Image (cartoon, rainbow, N blue to C red):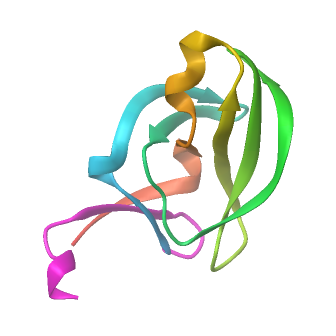
Amino acid sequence: MADLVGLRFYSCYKCQNHVSLQDDIVSKGFQAGSGRAFLFSHAMNIVLGPKEDRQLITGIHTVADVYCSDCGEVLGWKYEKAYEESQKYKEGKFVLEKFKIVRENR
């Protein structure tokens, strides 16, 4: 636990399960159905749903919903595949909805 001191985590708003680090934020300028969202390079303590093609603001993407591994709350999605070249940077990254996560300092 000592190696976690000083880290800033984002946690599930329902159960406080750590789901990402603040240092893993790629962008705070994303939109989800419920409002603002953040793009993260990594996520932890999550479960992925099945992959599906979804029409998003920036076009069709193959995504998988992201669930908290403790309480099962849907937190956002993972970009599995982007079909447009300008969107390829999103592949393998995670969108977590701002109102579904809380920032914690250790």
- Name which quarter of the figure residue 63 lies in: top right
Left or right of 7, for residue 20: right
| Residue at 49% from the left image edge and 26% from the top image edge | 89
Q: Residue at x 41, y 31 (%)?
A: 28
Which region is colored magenta?
Answer: 1-16
On whether residue 47 falls in the magenta region, the answer is: no
Q: Position of residue 36 (x, y in %)?
A: 55, 31
Q: Nearer the viewer, residue 73 or 48?
A: 48
Of residues 76 and 103, which is closer to you in this image?
Answer: 76
On screen, residue 36 above or below 96 = above
Query: Residue 83: x percent and y percent?
Result: 72, 19
x%, y% of residue 35? 62, 31
Height in image: 35 above or below 10?
above
Residue positioned 77% across, 35% down in the render: 62
**Viewer-proximal residue, 31 or 26?**
26
- Left or right: 53 in relation to 104: right
Residue 10 on the magenta span: yes
Q: Position of residue 105 (x, y in %)?
A: 24, 66
* Residue 35 in the figure: left or right of residue 105: right
Q: Quadrant of the C terminus?
A: bottom left
Query: What is the total number of numbered labels drawn onto the structure image?
Result: 0
Quarter holding the N terminus is: bottom left
Residue 31 shown left or right of residue 27 in the figure: right
Q: Residue at x 55, y 11 (%)?
A: 86
